[in-house]
Amino acid sequence: MEGVYIAGDDFKSGQTKYKSVLVDFLVGAGIKPVSIVSYNHLGNNDGKNLSSPKQFRSKEISKSNVVDDMVGSNKILYADGKKPDHTVVIKYVPYVADSKRAMDEYISEIFMNGSNTIVCHNTCEDSLLASPLILDLVILAELCERITVQLDNEPQSRRFNSILSILSYLLKAPLVPAGTPVVNALFKQRSCIVNVLKACIGLQPGNHMLLEHKIGAPLQQVSSMSTQANLMKHATTNHSVLKSKNQHLNGQTHGHVKTPSQ
């Protein structure tokens, strides 16, 4: 079928979601992870399927690649291009059923050739963490189906690419359109979703700068200082139409964001 959305592989529910937060923090703080070892055992059908070498290899790749973009973002720490040693182990233990155990060890290099080790243990009901993600994926995909973007110099609206990378927040191995950077850092993925939703109701994207508080200027003056291009002129939902001369998105293109209800 043409135009059907695809997102990627393997829901990001527990250990990998935590990893995408922790490694992002470490690398951003100038702490260099050099060894990451992740161990899991579980007894549900997921664990049984992963006892197959071929199935496990697929999971191993998706769990290991989740740190690549965060490591690649800091060329000072990883000037030689070398990645951390990253090992993933998954064992099938029928007795524990859906109560998954996940244990991680992160070893990092710090100031003056010191080392820092973080060890984590997590016990969770695997299916109960994953099931809500299915709902989130369906709801977000359905919403994206109703969003179109119309550029000022184009007569026809554009829809989201069939490779729906906005759903990467939910997945270990997200797919992206050709030439698009893969983002696995959890907060960056979430920020993408939040800013797209803000655009749909005519709000500026969040950047956490809060410049008006840093310089003690009234909010109106700070708004007039903005140099972002005026991307959004009209934003529509099934319930409201918002119009404003001071609505912005990311400053890269001009146009209208709307839904088929227009």
Image (spheres, helix red, strand yellow):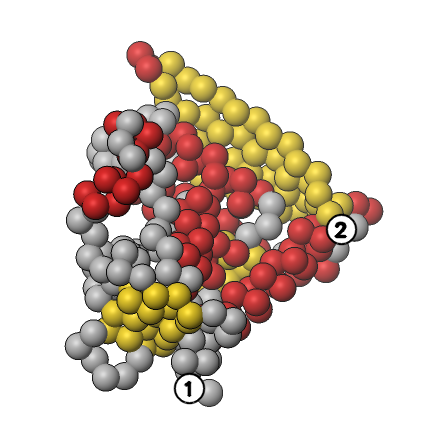
Q: Element under label 2?
A: loop
Q: Looking at the image, is mark 1 or mark 2 nearer the viewer?
A: 1
In the rendered image, the quadrant that contains the C terminus is bottom left
| Left or right of residue 10: residue 247 | left
Q: Nearer the viewer, residue 79 or 240?
A: 240
Residue at image location 52% in from the left, 71% down from the top: 239
In terms of image quadrants, where is residue 113? top left
Q: Amino acid at mark 2?
A: Asp
Q: Amino acid at mark 1?
A: Glu
Q: Residue lying at the far bottom in this picture: please name it.
A: 1
Residue at image location 31% in from the left, 12% down from the top: 112
Give the percent coordinates (x, y) of residue 137: 55, 64
Q: Nearer the viewer, residue 130 or 146?
A: 146
Q: Is residue 184 visible?
A: no
Give the percent coordinates (x, y) of residue 193: 44, 56
Q: Which mark is residue 98?
A: 2
Which residue has dot 1 on it?
A: 2
Q: Is residue 126 visible?
A: yes
Compared to residue 100, the image places residue 201 above or below, namely below
In terms of image quadrants, where is residue 45? bottom right
Of callouts 1 and 2, the N-terminal one = 1
| Left or right of residue 103: residue 94 | right
Residue at image location 73% in from the left, 47% down from the top: 125
Give the percent coordinates (x, y) of residue 190: 45, 50
In terms of image quadrants, where is residue 168? bottom left
Residue at image location 65% in from the left, 58% down from the top: 132
